[in-house]
Amino acid sequence: MKARTCWEGVCTVADLVPESGVAVWTAAGPVAVFYLPHRLPALFAISHTDPFSGANVLARGITGDLKGEPVVASPLYKQHFSLVTGQCLEDDTVAVKTYPVLLDGETIRLEVPISQSESAVA
């Protein structure tokens, strides 16, 4: 059974900083949204939590490109995470969650799971 999801508005285009990330809070927890205007697609969203430290820091990482793969380097231990797949490039046993991103007018929306308590109300 597929989990129910919704498209949650998390920020606006004006909140984004080119070539970097912003942290947003969603029903699924903290998410890092990245805006890379020189790429198509230009928007990426991954978990904000660094799996090696447990700290919510990935939106503060440095973005870049490794062999054509858009990545963010964790500001703590410097592992690189693919912005497309969430895979850690230094340890193939570790990955962070990725989220579909949608630009809806000026609003950035993420597809996030609906919690059981929210779906019971709807």
Image (tube, helix red, strand yellow):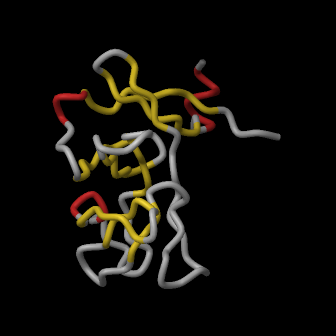
In this picture, residue 35 sits left or right of residue 119: left
- Residue 14, by quadrant, is top left
**Which residue is rendered at x = 41% and y = 46% of the image?**
44
Report x, y in % for residue 25. Answer: 33, 44
Report x, y in % for residue 76. Answer: 25, 79
**Which residue is rendered at x = 82% and y = 40% of the image?**
1
Taking depth in this image into account, of 24 and 103 the one nearest to the observer is 103
- The relative height of residue 17 versus residue 8 in the rendered view (above or below) is below
Taking depth in this image into account, of 65 and 86 the one nearest to the observer is 65
Taking depth in this image into account, of 76 and 1 the one nearest to the observer is 76
- The relative height of residue 115 versus residue 118 in the rendered view (above or below) is below
Report x, y in % for residue 28. Answer: 48, 46
- The relative height of residue 2 versus residue 20 in the rendered view (above or below) is above
Numbered disc total: 0
- Residue 53, by quadrant, is bottom left
**Which residue is rendered at x = 28% and y = 19% of the image?**
106
Report x, y in % for residue 63. Answer: 28, 62
Q: Residue furthest right?
A: 1
In this picture, residue 86 sits left or right of residue 13: right
**Which residue is rendered at x = 63% and y = 37% of the image?**
116
- The relative height of residue 3 versus residue 62 in the rendered view (above or below) is above
**Image quarter in which the C terminus is found:** top right
- Residue 72, by quadrant, is bottom left
Q: Residue furthest top?
A: 105
